[in-house]
Image (cartoon, grey):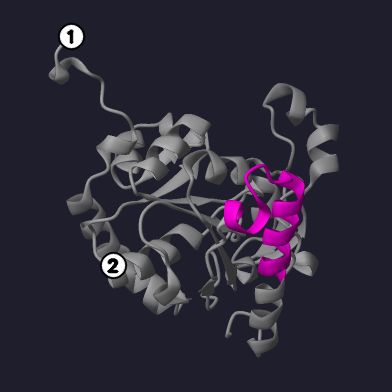
Amino acid sequence: MTATDIEPTEISKWDPGLTERVIALIRPLIKGYHRAEVRGLDSFPPGGALVVSNHSGGLFPMDVPVFATGFYEKFGYERPVYTLSHDVLFSGPIAEFFVRTGFIRASHENADEALRSGGVVVVFPGGDYDVYRPTLSENKIDFDGRTGYVRAALNAGVPIVPAVAIGGQENQLYLSRGMGLAHLLRLDKLMRVKILPISIGFPFGLSAVLPVNIPLPTKIVMQVLEPIDVTAEFGEDPDIDAVDAHVRRVMQTALDRLAKERRLPVIG
């Protein structure tokens, strides 16, 4: 087998030129509609880094576009931003587009390859559970007990960079994750879907995913925090749960500070 016969990985397919063009297209939405700010990038470490963030916005999460726009504006397009993503992104006709702009399947192998290549990998440990959290809990860090991100950072020997964002969960009023409703409708058995979120938004009002409401132009602020060197702070064989608790505690403190700054929902 020659070098040209080797199947390229998702990581190697990242296209900086295409990514730059996409960022240019979405910048008016990020900077105009959402008036987004990304703070704290001055302390971002060189080399591979695992960005661990809360996830907001339901069907329209803006965390990745907001972070990527701020990161590429500051550092340019020499260093890729990868996002660990659900398999559903890679089953449609635009799957290749997602891969070329940095979205990769959420697997230990992909995370390790991307981090060891010097890339920045964004992960949302809370996933769907987090992105559909009720409005009453919108400023709570909750990963639903998921700690795999700690092991990913350890395996690749890279720092964890916590990041918190506020505003995205104000794009409509989230009433419930609908876990009981999903179970009642047997969606957990039929489609492996554990949530059926219920929300109120514009223009259709009450929605259980459908009908799809338009996200409000809420101001989004993201704070990137100081990197955490897990081995240096917790030793060569750290307690994973202790590291996770520390990361969530640091994030919750930062998110509480952002919440205190916020004057009004949506307006910011």
Q: Residues within 10 Å of mark 2 (few under 14, many from 20)?
A: few
Q: Where is 53 relative to 194, above or below? A: below
Q: Where is 119 relative to 192, above or below? A: below
Q: In this rendering, would 75 be left or right of 192?
A: left
Taking the image as drawn, is residue 40 in sight? yes
Q: Where is 10 relative to 239, above or below? A: above
Residue nearest the viewer, comparing 266 with 19: 19
Q: Which residues are magenta?
A: 230-252
The residue type indicated by label 2 comes to: Phe
Q: Where is residue 76 drawn, in percent x and y?
A: 24, 65
Q: In this rendering, would 113 be left or right of 265?
A: left
Quadrant placement of the N terminus: top left
Residue 18 located within the stretch drawn in magenta: no
The residue type indicated by label 1 comes to: Met
SS assignment at label 2: helix
Taking the image as drawn, is residue 62 in sight? no
Provide the residue designation for mark 1: 1
Provide the residue designation for mark 2: 75
Q: Residue at x 70, y 53 (%)?
A: 243
SS assignment at label 1: loop
Q: Residue at x 56, y 52 (%)?
A: 59
The secondary structure that dominates the magenta segment is helix
Q: Where is residue 49 drawn, in percent x and y?
A: 45, 54
Q: Where is residue 111 drawn, in percent x and y?
A: 46, 39
When asked about the image quadrant of residue 163, the answer is: bottom right
When asked about the image quadrant of residue 230, the answer is: bottom right
Q: Residue at x 38, y 41 (%)?
A: 116
